Image: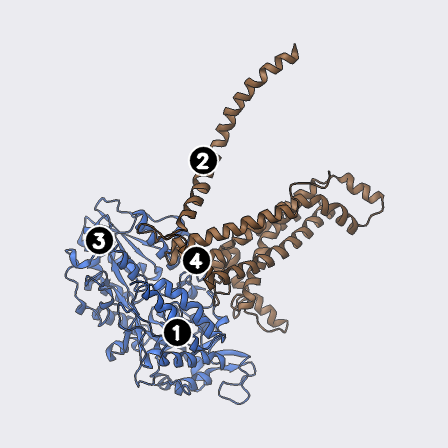
Amino acid sequence: MSTAQRGNQRRTSARACAASFAALALAVSAAGCAPQAGSAGDGKTVSYWMWDAAQQPAYEKCAKAFHKKNPGLRVKITQIGWDSYWTKLTSSFIAGTEPDVFTNHVAHYPQYEKIGVLSPLDELGPTRGIKASDYEPGLAKPWTGRDGHRYGAPKDWDTVGLFYDKKVTREAGVSDAELRDMAWNPEDGGSFEKVLARLTIDANGKRGDERGFDKDNVVRYGLATNDAGGDNHGQSQWSAFTGSNGWKYTDKNPWGERYNYDQKRFQETIDWYFGLAEKGYMAPLEDYSQTNFPEVQVGSGKAAMATEGSWKLSAFSGLKGVDLGIAPTPKGPTGERASMMGGLADSIPKGAKNKKGAAKWVAFLASAECQNIVGKDATVFPATPEGTEKAVAAHRKNGLDVTPFTRHIEDGTTFSFPVTDHAADINAIMLPAMQEVYAGDSPASSLTTTNKQVNFLFQQDD
Amino acid sequence: MAVIKSASAAPNRRRGDTRVALAFVAPAMLGYLVFLVWPTLRGVYLSFTSFDLLSEEKWTGLDNYRRLVNDPVFWDSLGVTLQYVMINIGVQTVAALLIAVLMHRLTRSTVVRGIVLAPYLVSNVVAGIVWLWILDTQLGVGNEVIEWLGFDRIAFFGDASWAIPTIALVNVWRHVGYTALLIFAGLQSISPTVYEAGRVDGASEWRMFRSITVPLLRPVLSLVLIITVVGSFQVFDTVSVTTDGKPANATNVLQLYVYDLAFDRLQFGYASAISVALMLVLTVITVMQYRLMRAGRSDLG
C-alpha cells in the first residue's frame, strides 16, 4: 500500500493517482480545505503549489534556506494531489486566487500559454538570468513559448528505465549483464523478448520459452502492465520502443501541428508491444488498475520487470522483499536506446499577488543551492548537472545504481515529451483508442483513423 | 353570533398566514432560484455557445447540438448509461422490495433495520474504493475467494463487459437499504386490518403480497422509482474513483463525459449541451413513469 500511495504523480491521466485510501484521503482533504492564495498581497508571503507529496520535504528545506536569505519573505507550500491539481489551478485562475508560483507540467502548460495567464520569466528581474545552458541538455527548450518568452524555470528531469527483482532474474538464469545489454525489434522481439519469455511462468511452472507453456494461465508475467499509455504518450509504456525504432510524435517539437500515429514505424512497434500481452509475456490490460501499479505487480511477484519513469525510484526502492535492479531500456532497430525525457518547471501566473517575491523564489528554486538540496534528498533528479550528481551519489550510498537513467543524457539518447496544443482533447481521443489495441479489439492500423481525428483538431485552428 | 365572529376573524388570520408563510418559504425559494433556476437557465444559454471559462463565450447557435447528434462518443455514452440504469434499478428495486416486505412481515427489530441501512452510511467514493480493492484482479480478496473456489479470476473493473454490471451492483449494495427503507415506510401506511381480513379469508402470504401489498404500495413504489431512476442516470462518483471511464470508454457514463469535457477539456459549451440533453431525457422518462404508473392515484379509492 505504501508503494501505491505515491501513485503516478507525473502521469497525465487525471485521477490515476488516486492510488489508495491514503492518497485519496489526502487529495480529498486538500480539495476540501480550499487552499488560499496565502499571500493576500501583503508582499511577505509567497504561495507555492506542488502535487508530489514525496518531494515536499526537500522543498520545505529550500523554503527555509530561502527565508534565511530573504528574511522578509516566507514561502507557504500547498500540496494538492495530481488528481485535483489542474482543476484547482484552472479554477484559481478564473477566481483570481492563483498561487504566486506553481509546479508546471509540459502536458498542461500549452493550454495556459495559449490563454496567456503565465508571466514571461525573462521579463522579471530575478529570473531574467535563467539560462538554458545551466541545465541538462534539452530541459529548457519546451518552456519557451511560441512568442519566444520563457514561461518555466526547469527544476528536475526524468527518463525511463527497466525495474526488476534480482531474485527473480537470478532464479531464471538471467544475469545482470545480460539485462544491461538487451535489444528488441518489431519482427521477433530480439533478446528483450527472449528474456521476457524466460521470466514468465505459468501455473504449471513452465516458462514462456518452454514447450507446453500455457499463456492463459500465467502466474508471473515477464513485463508488468501500466495501462495502454494513451493518455501520456506512452511515456513509461511504449515510448522507449517507438523512440528506438526511429519514430517521432509530431512534425516538430515543441509546438508541432501534426501527429504521426499513422506511420508504419509507430504502428509496427505498437503491434509488437501489445502483442507481448497476446503471447502471455506482458500482463493483460484488465490486470491494470489504480490499485495495481507496476511497482505493486513487481512487489507482489506478479511481474518480473516493469518499464517506469525515474520518478518512481523511491516507490520501487521501498518495496519489501525485492532485491531491486535497474536496467536501461533495450536498444532498438536504430541501434540505439531511446528514452523520453520529461521535466517539471516552476511558473508564475500573470495574476500573482506577490510577483516580486515569486520571481525571487523561482530564481532560488532554479539556483544551485536549492537544486543541491533537492539532489541530496534523491526523490527526483534535479535539473542542474551538479544537483543530478548529488542525487546519483545519494542513491549509490543506498546501494542503488541509477546510471541506466543518467546514461540517456550522457549518450544523448533522449527525446522530449510532445508539446502541442489540444493536449486534453488528444488524451480523450488517444486513451480509449490505445486501450482498444491493447485489449485486442482493434489492430494498430486503426490508429490511422485516430490520427486523423487528432490532426483534425489542429486544422480547425486556422 | 359565534358563526359571524369566526367568519370575520378568518380573513384576518389568513392575511397574517400569507406573510408568515412567505417568510418561511423565502429561504427555500432563494436557494431554489440561486442554485437551481439560475444555473439551469445559464446552462441552457451556454449550450448555444463556445465557452472555455477563461475567455468570453461566443454564440455558436445550434453547433453544439449538431455536434452532439454526430458524436459517436455521446451515443456510446448514452448507451452505457442506459445499461447501467437498467441493471442498477432492476436489481435494486426487486431486492429492496423483498427486503422491505421481509422486514415488514417478519421482524420488528430495529437492529435488523439498522444493518440493512448500514451501507448507505458509507460515502459513494469510499464504497467504490473498497470494492475496487476487494475485486482487484491480481490482489483482491474477492478474486482470491473465486480462485479458491476453482474458478478463473475475473477482471471486474478491468474487463469491458464486466465493468458496468459491477459498478451497477456496487451501487445497488450501497443504495438498496435506503430504497428498502422508503418502501418499508410505504408498507407501514397499509392498514393491518386489510391483512387481517385477508388472513380471515384464508389468503396465503404470496396472495396477500400480490393482491394487497403491491396495489396499495403502488403510489409509494412509483415515487421511489422516479427518484431512483433520476439518481441512477446521474451516476458519477463511483465510476470516477473505480474505472474513470476505462477500459476504452466502456464505463464512460454521461456525467463522466460531461465532467471530462468541461473540466479537463474546458469545452463548457458542448458539456452544457449534453447536460441539457440529459435533462430532457430525464424529464421525458419521469413524465412517462408518472403517467404509466398512475403515481398520483391510490388503489384504495
The quarter of the image holding the N terminus of chain A is bottom left
Question: In whole angstroms, how far apart are the C-alphas of marks 4 and 3?
Answer: 46 Å
Q: Chain of mark 1?
A: A
Number of the front mark, 2 or 1: 2
Q: Amino acid at mark 4?
A: Arg
Q: Nearer the observer, disc 4 or disc 1?
A: 4
Dividing the picture into quadrants, the one containing residue A407 is: bottom left
Give, as a three-letter code, the residue at label 1.
Gln
Judging depth in this view, the residue of A269 and A400 nearest the camera is A269
* Pointers 2 and 3 in contact (C-beta within 8 Å): no
Q: Residue furthest top?
A: B1
Does the residue at mark 1 contact the one at mark 3 (Cβ under 8 Å)?
A: no
Helix, strand or loop under label 1:
loop
Residue A36 % position (x, y): 32, 47
Using the numbered discs, state the Cα–Cα distance from disc 2 to disc 3 in whole angstroms: 42 Å
Q: Are marks 1 and 3 on the same chain?
A: yes
Q: Which residue is mark 2?
A: B30
Q: Which chain is blue?
A: A
Q: Is residue A179 left or right of residue B280?
A: left
| For residue A128, side relative to residue B94 (left or right) | left
Query: Mark 1 = which residue?
Result: A237
Quadrant location of residue A424? bottom left
Q: Nearer the viewer, mark 4 or mark 2?
A: 4
Mark 2 and mark 1 on one chain: no
The residue beneath circle 4 is: B66
Q: Colour of chain B?
A: brown
